Image (cartoon, rainbow, N blue to C red):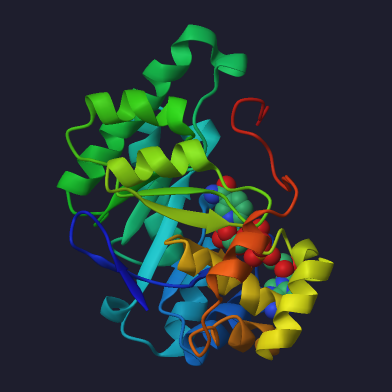
Amino acid sequence: MNFTLSNNLTIPAPGFGTFKTPDGDICINSVREAIHAGYTHIDTAAVYGNEKSVGEGVRQSGADRSGLFITSKVWNTERGYDKTLRACEKTLEDLGMDYLDLYLIHWPANEQQFGDQAVKINLDTWKAMERLHDEKLVRSIGLSNFYAHHLEPVLANADVAPVIDQIEYHPGLLQEETVDLCKKNSILVEAWSPLGRGKLVEDPLLIETAGRYGKSPAQVILRWVLQRGVLPLVKSVHADRIRQNLDIFDFTLTDEDMAKIAALPDTRFGSHPDTAKF
Ligand SMILES: NC(=O)c1ccc[n+]([C@@H]2O[C@H](COP(=O)([O-])OP(=O)(O)OC[C@H]3O[C@@H](n4cnc5c(N)ncnc54)[C@H](OP(=O)(O)O)[C@@H]3O)[C@@H](O)[C@H]2O)c1
């Protein structure tokens, strides 16, 4: 299925993740496998260290670049106007592509690390994102790990509006304040680590629910994310799971099951943007 972004571009769901996918053959093969299975949306980042392999996997798939949606992200060491422009150039070179469909600021500069300079750093970085957009090197621009209070100054100062916020999101981490602000501003939320890096598939409620629908716990989670209007990104390096994670369109979770899954206890698998030290 596709979501439509506020700039009218369509973005396919689910997206295929590549975090912690080792550079080289494993990454090349998993990206090629994913495209052959039917994914047309690939999510990577400079800091994953595998952009060359992602690009190679795309080329080996034989898919037409224009039918794919490719996302990358500017890493924290490259924040600021000039460094962000150069970071995007390097990402395009490593991917072997002449444009990205989406470029994201990977993490906001936070106050714990940057004090009262944090907002200025994020705004300077955003200005570079806008220039990359104007120059058509990137078709859309957005944010990642920006919670409501990081997002507000960008919204107040942007000439080109962010179309996406990619945040940790899964049963046990509903991110209501940020999701509400995104909805009000027509920003699509993308879920990273929807499976809790694989750990949530062991949850007894999700196992029980999956059994009733004849699906796997991973499929139930991805379906739950989609039914909440959020775009899941999911990573696997195994062909069977790559295919399984795409097979989520032949069932619908009831309102009761949606609510039970939403009530799972609070949990977080990655860093919090306010306390991240990297
Ligand atoms: N913006 C950010 O800061 C940020 C942070 C984290 C992630 N992301 C993006 O979001 C994507 C997804 O997040 P993620 O990779 O952290 O976690 P995830 O997709 O929630 O989970 C991936 C883990 O689950 C396992 N898995 C995949 N499908 C499965 C299935 N059907 N059954 C059981 N286990 C399964 C994978 O193992 P195998 O590979 O061995 O199959 C892997 O260990 C990333 O790859 C990345 O593109 C962004």
Q: Would you identify the image quadrant in which residue 130 lies?
A: top left
Placement of the N terminus among the 4 image quadrants: bottom left
Q: Is residue 254 above or below residue 244?
A: above
- Tell me the residue at 25%/45% (across/down): 132
Give the mark count: 0
- Residue sitting nearer the eye, 127 or 235: 235
The residue lying toward the viewer, choosing from 84 and 231, is 231
Indicate left or right for 243 with 105 as reference. Answer: right
Q: Please, which residue is most extreme toward the front here?
A: 256
Residue displayed at 81% across by 66% down: 203
Residue extending furthest top? 116
In this picture, is 58 found above or below 78? below
Q: Quadrant of ligand 1?
A: bottom right
Of residues 71 and 170, the one drawn nearer to the viewer in this rendering: 170
Q: Position of residue 88 (x, y in %)?
A: 37, 47
Can see residue 7?
yes
Q: Residue at x 50, y 90 (%)?
A: 250
Residue 259 at x, y = what percent?
A: 60, 61
Residue 234 appears in the picture as rendered: no
Residue 164 higher or lower than 205, as above or below: above
Residue 273 falls in image quadrant: top right
Q: Residue at x 40, y 41 (%)?
A: 180
Q: Quadrant of the C terminus?
A: top right
Residue 243 coordinates in the image, percent (x, y)? 60, 88
User: Which quarter of the figure has residue 21?
Assistant: bottom right
In the displayed structure image, the side of residue 51 where residue 165 appears, left or right: left
Of 143 and 132, the residue lying toward us: 143
